[in-house]
Image (tube, rainbow, N blue to C red):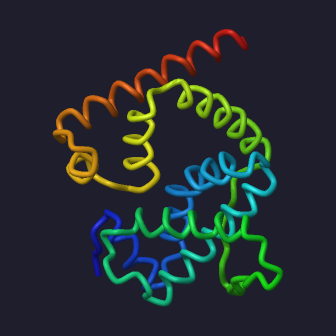
Amino acid sequence: MATESGPAGLVERIQLGDSEAETELVDRFYGRIFAMALARTGDPEVARDLAQEVMISVICALREGRLRNHDSLTGYVCTTARNTISFFFRGRAQRKETPLPADLQIDLPDPEQCFSSVERSRLALLAIGSLKSSDRAILQASLIDGQGSTEIAADMGLSSEVVRKRKSRALRHIRELLKEKRSQNG
């Protein structure tokens, strides 16, 4: 039975028990979630733990069919990450742990790769910090919250074309700053 390759197809494959789809999900979202957690906590170890916890929670939820709209996978993952990170900061003594399914086997990134990823994340955060607050809001809504340009435009009172251009310029600015920093660090 063939399934589509987008988010809905990925969710369907996970529900059917496809472990490669679970690995694909981790490959697609782990880096973003790790960056979110690192930005909020400032601690790579805590960020790694939170990112792993989010991935396990999402995979368990998808296996159980708890995501009603399969096309909203990105939003679901980001919301789960936001909630998990917020829960971490609330510091509840009775923290609910998600039981790790016995058949869950995910290859997580090599710690050396994570270290270079942390440095890239730090540089990216510095570059993002140099943007106007409205451009940061556009990037957050798009890349973190998973909103489309039409939705962002409606929220900000702009046209979707303006949102797309500002997002493109902001990303180009970040890339240029990162190239500059990499060349300085040699």
Tally of numbered discs: 0
In the picture shown, does residue 110 fall above or below 15? above
Q: In the rendered view, does 10 fall on the left or right side of 83?
A: left
Q: Position of residue 120 (x, y in %)?
A: 65, 33
> Who is closer to the viewer here, 161 or 175?
161
Location of residue 132 with respect to 93 vertically, above or below? above
Extreme front residue here? Answer: 157
Residue 155: percent from the left, percent from the top? 27, 51
Q: Is residue 61 above or below residue 166?
A: below
Identified at 57% across, 64% down, the residue is 81
Left or right of 26, for residue 99: right
Residue 2 left/right relative to 45: left
Residue 85, x across and y down, in percent: 65, 63
Residue 114, position as x, y percentages in the image: 73, 45
User: On the rendered structure, is 156 left or right of 66?
Assistant: left
Give the quarter of the image for residue 183.
top right
Camera-side residue of 146 and 117:
146
Query: Which image quadrant: the C terminus?
Result: top right
- Residue at 40% x, 23% y: name it: 172
